[in-house]
Every structure is written in structure tokens, then in C-alpha cells.
Image (cartoon, rainbow, N blue to C red):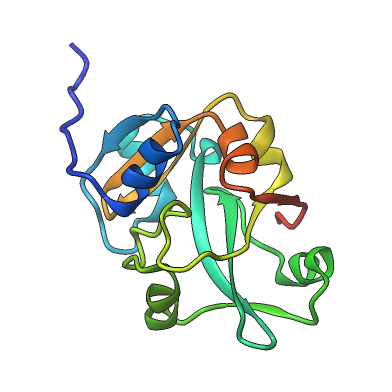
Amino acid sequence: MARKTPHVSETPATQWLKAHGVSYTEHAYDYVDHGGTAESARQLGWPEHQVIKTLVMEDERGDPLVVLMHGDRQVSTKNLARAIGVKSVQPCKPEVAQRHSGYLVGGTSPFGTRKALPVYVEASVLALERILINGGRRGFLVGLAPAVLETVLGARPVQCAI
């Protein structure tokens, strides 16, 4: 018998998805510190390549941006900087990322962020049939069609995976 996924209360991300008419499924799991996408993929029985991580980064001026990347891949900050036309990009410190996004690190969603941030998505993510991405709380992912990232969220495709 399939394990029933428990309902998770609303988050700013799920409120945003509902407000924009996006169809999604809820996937709760037991959050593990530093477990990352490998842990959530294992618990939920999904390929890690389809579990998308939300990374808050900043350019050389300190301007924040969000990068959506396959769980089993890393971001080439050099390639990302080149793709978006800035000198350099680096990950934000956790407290800075939280201030920009409004989410705790480990529960960062690209939907419903505290302030509007530019969002970039690894282009190959858009070719997947379905993805899991953070739903705005640690231990909570939402499943949706990746086209939503580009058409509704406005994410710009880039090629920066390594």
C-alpha cells in the first residue's frame, strides 16, 4: 500500500502557487540537516536529478538572485556569471539568503519569496516531465510541471550545470 503523504499547512510558496492557478502535489518527508536533495529523493523514491534545489546567490554588487538546479548537479558560478552578464556570482551566506528570500535555508522555495528576485533555471530542468521543488518549508516539496518555472515564475533558462 502506498504511503499517504501527510498534508502540510500553507506556506508563502503554496499561497503563491494557488494564487497563480498552478496545479501541484504535496510531498512531505523527514527533514535531515545537510541531507539535501539526496535525502529527500531517497525518502520520496524520486530520481535526485528530478529534485530541484533552490539556491540563493549574489553577484559582485551583492544583488541577490535565485538559481534552480538539478539535485545531482552543481552550479558553475563562472558559467552562470557569463550567462547572466555579471562579473562574478557566489552563494549567499545562510543568514543573507534567508533575509532575501524569507525562507530558512533547507526550506527555500523560488515561489513567494519575500522580495522579487531574478530566477534562473538550468535549461535541462525544463525538459523533464515532472519535478519536485521546495514548497517553502524544510521537509516539504511540491511536484509540478517544470514549464511553470519559465511560464509562470519567469525563470530564465541558463546552462551552468557541472
Residue 107, x across and y down, in percent? 33, 58
Write the residue at 56% across / 39% down. 49
Above or below residue 85? Residue 152 is above
Number of numbered markers: 0
Above or below residue 159? Residue 123 is above
Residue 126, x across and y down, in percent? 66, 36
Write the residue at 53% across / 36% down. 50
* Residue positioned most to the top: 1
* Res 133 → quadrant: top left
Residue 7, x across and y down, in percent? 17, 34
76 or 81, nearer to the observer: 81
Residue 75, x across and y down, in percent? 65, 62
| Left or right: 11 as drawn, with respect to 99 | left
Write the residue at 71% across / 70% down. 77
For the C terminus, the quadrant is bottom right
82 or 118, nearer to the observer: 118
For the N terminus, the quadrant is top left
Above or below residue 110? Residue 4 is above
* Residue positioned most to the front: 19
42 or 19, nearer to the observer: 19
| Left or right: 158 as drawn, with respect to 50 | right
* Res 33 → quadrant: bottom left
Write the residue at 15% across / 32% down. 6
